[in-house]
């Protein structure tokens, strides 16, 4: 497990899709370990597992009214496999001894450090590995090394538990430097979505330690509320007509505002049941090209998915799906605020969760297997660091 975890950020550097087989391999290893040490030692989290099962069941049911039954069934099957593998891997943490967990975290640290070094080489020398050796075509100064956004996003999520492990080990200065290095490299890559998510995570982190009793529930309620009101925002405060002036925001974000506005209009047509699983890629009108002289980046109104987890769930799975996502997001924030592994644990885990939530709602498709695998692997890293003997 230490070797597999260590290889995961390096493999993601070469192709983000490598995270999916990494997750599946870890699931196999957990099954083998459970066979030797007892399946009863797997962690039981009925509420979270129940919500995940409800999401899969509702996605499967939505195939009855989906725009394309084949796409919907395939998407549901992939979703079920990914969520099942991730839940199993996370449940396997109690199977490991303290020494084994430290070994796994050490492997992850080594792999993340190597991946960070590879990213730095790419930034400083203009992509000698991905462009020079792998032959990825460079698309100019605007796009930059955009294909490194995915592995950088993975490293951003790993930076938090690695910093926590270093802090617990008495290496506070190195922990702070780890977070700084991740943030600086993200900005140097011009990965603005990741940088924004990381900054918001840094802002949210200290809030978690203000009051264990009140801060967590308040933040969890706020996150759930954002998910539930997501379809209203692109038609009001985030409406393109209110924000875009030709100079701000960037071209990619301008395009995204139009995507979100289009998704919100489609959600309003079927708010209760949604359009069915995987409907975003074939939604009517989605292939229409944005036409606005003030927008330098004119793409289609729906390039496969809304680049927003809340809007995609609303669009495809309607109100029931949104309620499940809101509950899962709130649970994650509550769990982060209640982390018990030293005084910095709530802050750093909350920073990770908030960073992940912001990234989820600004970029990738929520059903993309590699992205779900990244979220599971980042969560596993945190669980390995937080777990103690005897565990609370």
Image (cartoon, helix red, strand yellow):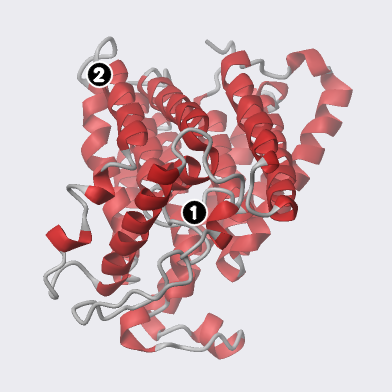
Q: Which residue occupies the foreground of this view, 177 or 42? A: 42
Q: Quadrant of residue 163?
A: top left
Q: Are marks 1 and 2 in contact (CB under 8 Å)?
A: no
Extreme residue toward the front, this view: 269
Quick check: 246 left or right of 31? Answer: left
Report the residue at 58% width, 23% height from top: 51
Asked whether residue 298 is in view, the answer is: yes
Residue 188 x, y percent position in the rendering: 30, 70
Up-down: is 350 above or below 24? above
Q: Secondary structure at mark 1?
A: helix
Q: Which residue occupies the foreground of this view, 12 or 329? A: 329
Residue 57 x, y percent position in the rendering: 68, 30
Q: Quadrant of residue 135?
A: bottom right
Report the residue at 34% width, 66% height from top: 191
Q: Which residue is mark 1?
A: 154
Q: Residues within 10 Å of mark 2 (few under 14, many from 20)?
A: some
Q: Which residue is mark 2?
A: 215
Q: Secondary structure at mark 2?
A: helix
Up-down: is 230 above or below 224? below
Q: Which residue occupies the foreground of this view, 368 or 95? A: 368
Asked whether residue 116 is in view, the answer is: no
Alpha carbons under labels 1 and 2: distance apart: 27 Å
Residue 211 x, y percent position in the rendering: 23, 15
Image quarter hosting the N terminus: top right
């Amino acid at each position: 497990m230490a070797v597999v975890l260590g290889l995961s950020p390096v493999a993601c550097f070469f192709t983000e899709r490598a995270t999916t087989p990494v997750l599946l391999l870890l699931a196999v290893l957990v099954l083998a370990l459970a066979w030797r040490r007892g399946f009863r030692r797997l962690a039981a989290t009925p509420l979270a597992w129940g919500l995940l099962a409800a999401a899969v069941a509702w996605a499967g049911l939505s195939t009855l009214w989906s725009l394309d039954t084949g796409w919907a069934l395939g998407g549901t099957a992939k979703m079920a496999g990914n969520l099942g593998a991730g839940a199993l891997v996370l449940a396997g943490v109690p199977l490991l001894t303290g020494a084994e967990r430290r070994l796994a975290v050490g492997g992850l640290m080594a792999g993340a450090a190597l991946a960070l070094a590879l990213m730095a080489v790419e930034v400083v020398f203009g992509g000698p590995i991905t462009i020079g050796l792998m032959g990825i075509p460079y698309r100019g100064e605007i796009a930059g090394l955009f294909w490194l956004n995915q592995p950088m996003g993975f490293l951003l999520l790993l930076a938090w538990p690695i910093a926590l492990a270093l802090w617990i080990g008495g290496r506070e200065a190195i922990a702070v430097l780890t977070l700084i290095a991740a943030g600086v490299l993200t900005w140097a890559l011009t990965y603005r979505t990741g940088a924004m998510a990381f900054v918001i995570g840094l802002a949210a982190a200290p809030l978690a330690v203000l009051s264990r009793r009140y801060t967590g529930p308040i933040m969890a309620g706020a996150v759930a509320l954002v998910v539930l009101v997501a379809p209203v925002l692109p038609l009001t405060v985030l409406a393109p007509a209110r924000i875009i002036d030709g100079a701000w925001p960037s071209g990619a974000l301008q395009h995204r505002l139009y995507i979100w506005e289009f998704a919100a209009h489609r959600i309003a047509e079927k708010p209760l049941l949604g359009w069915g699983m995987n409907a975003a890629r074939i939604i009517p009108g989605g292939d229409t090209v944005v036409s606005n002289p003030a927008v330098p980046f004119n793409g289609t109104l729906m390039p496969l998915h809304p680049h927003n987890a809340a809007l995609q769930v609303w669009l495809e799975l309607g109100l029931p799906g949104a309620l499940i996502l809101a509950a899962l997001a709130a649970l994650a924030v509550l769990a982060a605020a209640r982390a018990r592994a030293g005084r910095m644990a709530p802050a750093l885990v909350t920073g990770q969760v908030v960073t992940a939530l912001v990234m989820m709602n600004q970029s990738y498709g929520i059903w993309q297997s590699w992205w779900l695998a990244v979220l599971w692997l980042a969560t596993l890293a945190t669980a390995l660091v937080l777990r103690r003997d005897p565990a609370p």
